[in-house]
Image: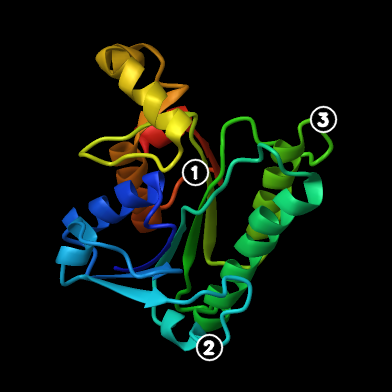
Amino acid sequence: MRVILFGATGMVGQGVLRECVLDSDVEAVVSVVRRASGPSLGRRSEKVCEVVTDEFYDFSRVEGEFSGFDACFFCLGVSSVGMNDAEYRRVTYDLTMAVAQAVLRQNPTTAGGGMTFIYVSGAGTDSTERGRVMWARVKGATENALLALGFKAAYMFRPGAIVPLHGITSKTKLYRVAYTVLRPFLPLLLRRFPRYVTTTEQVGRSMLAVAKLGYPKPVLEAVDIANA
């Protein structure tokens, strides 16, 4: 399986990249980034190469390198804190759709195959697009648009709290502090609250399993991610 990955430098993306490297069914991973990354498990693997572009709303210069893939894992995401609706929609809906349309053009759905697109959304996303919470409406609109775009298959992952493993850290200082404080309790939280807590390892493994085997429904909540 050949995978194209967006967001490999973030906490979730690091976990997904790690699992792709370790999975014997994955023969190649192209990581699309704004800046070349530093040394990491992914960079040390011959499976992984990077496509560097500073324009994430127009991939015309590099889009030709998106051809020939079985799955796209989209792990980019930002906090809505301090953003208004238009700002958050641009960096969530607009950017995601620019990526999805570019990879779909290069890997069109045919009778003989096509691409599976997996989008990391979030618990509490509003599929009706009419709720009172801005970020949930925008995420819901993004999910709905992806499901209607025409991929061979598309799945929306809605994890709750994600625990970073294997030395992976969040770029957000508040999250890093929270994980440090909660670390002694994480094994208990994972056992007691599987509907709300998962790990970077589990998210990565579940994405690979769903890309290979599919899943009975297009939207996966945390408990589905744990069981996929």
Res. 127 in view: no
Q: Which amino acid does label 2 sit on?
A: Arg
> Residue 182's x, y, as percent?
34, 16
Q: How crowded is mark 1: few (under 14 residues within 10 Å), some or many (20 or more)?
A: few
Q: In the picture shown, does residue 144 fall above or below 203? A: below
Viewer-proximal residue among 211 and 23: 23
Q: In the image, is 190 to the left or to the right of 214? A: left
For label 2, the residue is 61
Q: Which of disc 3 and disc 1 is earlier in sequence? A: 3
Instruction: Report how far apart the C-alphas of labels 2 and 1 lie in the structure.
Output: 37 Å
Residue 87: x and y, percent?
A: 74, 52
Mark 3 or mark 2, earlier in chain: 2
Residue 106 pos. (x, y %): 51, 82
Viewed as shown, does residue 97 lie left or right of 65?
Answer: right
Between marks 2 and 1 in the image, the one whose residue lies nearer the viewer: 2
Q: Quarter-wise, where is residue 39 in the image? A: bottom left
Decide which of 78, 126 is in the foreground and name it.
Answer: 78
Which residue position holds label 3? 132
- The image quadrant of residue 186 is top left
* Residue marked by disc 1: 216
Mark 1: amino acid? Pro
